[in-house]
Image (tube, grey):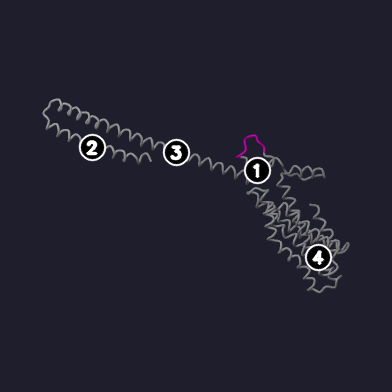
C-alpha cells in the first residue's frame, strides 16, 4: 500500500513545481517592465528562493518517498514472515492434537530419554496359577482388557448361534417336526439378526458400543436360557431364537465402535481381526461342545449352559 502511494506523491510534487514555474515566468515578465532597481532585486531574490526550493525540496521529497516505500516493503516482508510463522505453529499444534487423540501410546522417538512407556513395560507371561492370572490381567493395558472382553463376547455370541444346528435333531424328534418346520426354527435367528443391524449401529454411535454390547448380550443370553423353559412348541422356540438374533445383531457394530474408541489407528486392523476371530472360535466350540452335552444329558442342557456363559461378562 505504501509503495503504491509513491507515484501519486511524485505527481503532486511535479504539479507544484509546474505552478512555481508559472509564477517565475510571471515575475520575470513583471520584472522586465519595472525600472526600479529595488523591485528588480526583490524579484531576483524571490526567483533564487524558488529555484533553491525546487532543487532541495525535490531531492528531499524523492528521498522521503523512496524511504517510505522501502520501509513499507520491509514491514510487508515482516508481516509475511509473521503470518508464515503463525501458520507453522498452527500446523504443529494440529499435529500434536491429532497425535494425542489418535493414539494413547507414544513412540520411542517422541518420548524423552529415560522415560518408560507403561504399555511397553507390560509383557505377556503364561500364568502358572490363579493369582498369576489376576496379576497379569490387572497389569495389562486397558485397551487389551477391553479387547479380551469383546472377543469373549463374540465367542459366546456364536456359541449361542450355532447350538441350534446340533440341538435341532433331538428337538425335531421330540416334537415330531418335519424338515420344513425344523428349517423354519433354524432360520428364526437370522430374522432378528438382520433386523437389529442398522439400529445397533445407530445406538452404538449415539451411546457407545461399551453400553450397547452388554445389553445385546443380556438379551441373547436370556432368550437362549428361555428356550428349554418356554419351548413347548414351534412358535415359542421360533420367537426365542428371533430374540437371540436381535441381541447378537448389535454385536458387530458395538465391537467396532469399542475398538475405534479404545485402540489407536495403527493397531485397529489387528484389533478388528482379533475380536472378530471370536465368531469362528465360538462356532468351533459350540459345534464341538453341544453334541457332548446332548449325549450326556439332553438338548435342553445345551441352551441352559451356553446361555449362562453370557452372564460371565
Q: Is residue 287 left or right of residue 66?
A: right
Q: Which residue is mark 3?
A: 79
Local secondary structure at mark 3: helix
Residue 115 falls inside the magenta stretch: yes
- Residue at the farthest right position: 297
Q: Which mark is residue 105?
A: 1
Give percent across and percent down for residue 97.
59, 43
The residue at 53%/42% (across/down) is 90
Magenta: main secondary structure: loop
Say if mark 3 contacts mark 2, CB within 8 Å: no
Disc 2 crowd, CA 10 A, few/some/many (<14, 14-19, 20+): few
Q: Which mark is residue 276?
A: none
Pair 1/2: label in front: 2
Q: Which residue is mark 4?
A: 166
Q: Is residue 68 left or right of residue 55?
A: right
Of callouts 4 and 2, the N-terminal one: 2
The residue lying toward the viewer, choosing from 3 and 273, is 3
Local secondary structure at mark 1: loop
Q: CA distance from mark 1 to mark 2?
A: 79 Å
The residue at 20%/35% (across/down) is 23
Say if mark 4 contacts mark 2, CB within 8 Å: no
Magenta-drawn segment: 109-116
Amino acid at each position: 500500500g505504501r509503495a503504491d502511494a509513491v507515484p501519486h506523491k511524485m505527481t503532486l510534487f511535479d504539479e507544484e513545481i509546474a505552478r512555481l514555474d508559472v509564477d517565475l515566468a510571471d515575475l520575470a515578465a513583471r520584472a522586465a517592465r519595472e525600472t526600479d532597481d529595488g523591485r528588480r532585486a526583490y524579484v531576483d531574490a524571490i526567483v533564487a528562493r524558488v529555484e533553491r526550493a525546487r532543487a532541495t525540496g525535490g531531492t528531499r521529497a524523492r528521498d522521503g518517498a523512496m524511504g517510505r516505500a522501502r520501509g513499507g516493503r520491509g514491514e510487508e516482508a515482516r508481516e509475511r514472515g509473521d503470518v508464515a510463522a503463525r501458520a507453522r505453529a498452527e500446523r504443529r499444534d494440529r499435529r500434536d492434537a491429532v497425535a494425542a487423540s489418535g493414539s494413547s501410546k507414544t513412540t520411542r522417538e517422541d518420548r524423552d530419554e529415560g522415560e518408560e512407556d507403561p504399555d511397553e513395560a507390560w509383557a505377556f507371561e503364561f500364568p502358572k496359577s490363579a493369582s498369576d492370572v489376576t496379576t497379569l490381567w490387572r497389569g495389562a493395558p486397558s485397551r487389551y482388557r477391553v479387547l479380551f472382553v469383546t472377543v469373549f463376547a463374540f465367542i459366546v455370541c456364536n456359541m449361542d448361534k450355532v447350538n441350534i444346528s446340533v440341538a435341532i435333531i433331538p428337538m425335531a424328534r421330540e416334537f415330531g417336526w418335519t424338515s420344513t418346520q425344523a428349517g423354519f426354527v433354524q432360520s428364526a435367528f437370522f430374522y432378528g439378526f438382520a433386523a437389529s443391524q442398522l439400529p445397533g449401529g445407530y445406538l452404538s454411535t449415539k451411546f457407545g458400543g461399551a453400553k450397547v454390547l452388554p445389553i445385546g448380550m443380556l438379551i441373547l443370553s436370556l432368550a437362549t436360557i428361555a428356550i428349554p423353559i418356554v419351548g413347548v412348541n414351534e412358535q415359542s422356540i421360533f420367537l426365542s431364537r428371533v430374540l437371540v438374533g436381535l441381541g447378537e445383531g448389535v454385536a458387530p457394530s458395538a465391537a467396532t465402535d469399542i475398538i475405534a474408541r479404545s485402540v489407536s489407528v495403527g493397531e485397529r486392523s489387528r484389533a478388528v481381526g482379533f475380536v472378530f476371530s471370536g465368531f469362528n472360535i465360538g462356532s468351533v466350540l459350540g459345534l464341538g461342545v453341544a453334541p457332548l452335552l446332548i449325549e450326556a444329558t439332553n438338548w435342553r442342557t445345551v441352551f441352559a449352559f451356553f446361555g449362562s456363559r453370557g452372564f460371565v461378562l
